[in-house]
Amino acid sequence: MDDPPFKVIDTPTKGFGMFAARPISKGSLIFVEHPIFIVPAMPLPKGPGFQVYEQVGSGIPEDQYQEMTTMANCRDFEECPSIVEGVARTNALNLEFRFPSIFDGSGGRHYGGAFLKINRCNHSCGPNAAYKWNLSLLSATLYALRDIQEGEEITITYADPLQPRSDRWKKLQPDYRFTCDCPWCTHSDSAAQEESDNSREYLQTYVATHPSYRKWSADPCLPDNHVIDAHLSALPVIQREGLDALLPLFMEEILRCYGELGNEAEFKAWTEKTIELCSVGDRKLAQELKRYLENPQKNFPRWAKRRPKPIREGLTYHFVKFGLATELTLFVLGKSARLRHTPSSLLESEADDFFSFGLLEVGA
Ligand SMILES: C[S@@+](CC[C@H](N)C(=O)[O-])C[C@H]1O[C@@H](n2cnc3c(N)ncnc32)[C@H](O)[C@@H]1O
């Protein structure tokens, strides 16, 4: 990148840091970089490990090696006699080398990569940036999670931000040797700090157990706004805690719900907002969403499938609920309708004649 949107500046308390040289809009690219070296994520045993780290260092071009020696190293000589190991254990980003299962059935292999520029990002528990490792290009991409003002520090997270502050500190102290003073760790009073911890605990549970679009889509008995309302109340908590990396996950589900409800205005608005956030962080999803936007009715696979359809006389409707045999009597538009079990294959074959919640047989 010829003119990257950041400067690396020496700070009074955190060593060097990366700062925005101009405004950076949410979702946009900050920098793409190859690692200067890659080592296994687990520390190598002392003795033979030293030789390996030194060998890695000897392969780095001289000018880059010199720059690497200016990177933060929070390990002393006793702990890490090789500077490569010290730099790796203070800076390395987790790089996954997962090849398609036909090549490596055993799954991923984890390595750590050191990056001359991206590693200048200091930590925050509410980071405004994130990186994505791209195995095919052997590079990491740093991108903005929210709008960043000129002069603002660009931060990533080194700890699981969904954990409470005490647990985050348990990782940051031994691994990186600092006490975090980000706004989410230094609330002015204990009540606000407790609220932040509670919010993160709530979000941790929400990420694991939230009502999902997939289940809602398969369950016609759930209310139309079941997922949308739940996510809309989680989004402000996510933003208040600075956990913007979680937003696309829930925004994608909201837009899919609106698509299935056939609400074009909301569908387009949420799709545009999600594309903006994930155009660098999740390009595949961004491309899929752009295709939906071109023609929602045609390209969104479940467009308006949940929109109630008027019952027309002379048609036969069947009702299906989870494939269970059901014998019920119901009044629809003043007509007595008999509900009965129908093989679930009908769900596929006659999908267009669905009532919003399934198929209904109107008694003659
Ligand atoms: C990956 S480096 C970040 C760049 C580093 N500041 C430098 O000078 O190159 C990690 C080290 O930076 C410092 N650091 C990172 N985030 C910090 C923060 N929020 N507060 C204080 N120090 C921090 C710690 O010394 C940590 O071990």
Image: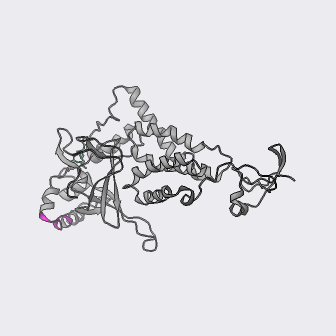
Tell me what residue is drawn at x 43 percent, y 57 percent: 286
Q: Quadrant of residue 166?
A: top left
Count how many numbered circles sit on residues in the image.
0
Position of residue 1 in the picture relative to residue 254 (left or right): left
Question: Where residue 237 appears, x then y in whole percent?
Answer: 45, 37
Q: Residue furthest right?
A: 364
In the displayed structure, 265 sits above or below 322; it is above
In the displayed structure, 324 sits above or below 147; it is below
State the scheme by which the image is colored. one colour
Tell me what residue is drawn at x 41 percent, y 36 percent: 240
Q: Nearer the viewer, residue 102 or 154?
A: 154
Question: Where residue 94 appears, x then y in whole percent?
Answer: 33, 57
Question: Where residue 209 appears, x then y in whole percent?
Answer: 55, 46
State which quarter of the image contains the N terminus: bottom left
Tell me what residue is drawn at x 35 percent, y 65 percent: 135
Q: Quadrant of residue 110?
A: bottom left
Q: Is residue 304 magenta?
A: no
Q: Does the image show residue 49?
A: yes
Question: What is the magenta range?
Answer: 56-62
Ligand 1 visible in quadrant:
top left
Question: Where residue 2 appears, x then y in whole percent?
Answer: 20, 58
Q: Does the image show residue 212?
A: no
Q: Nearer the viewer, residue 94 or 232?
A: 232
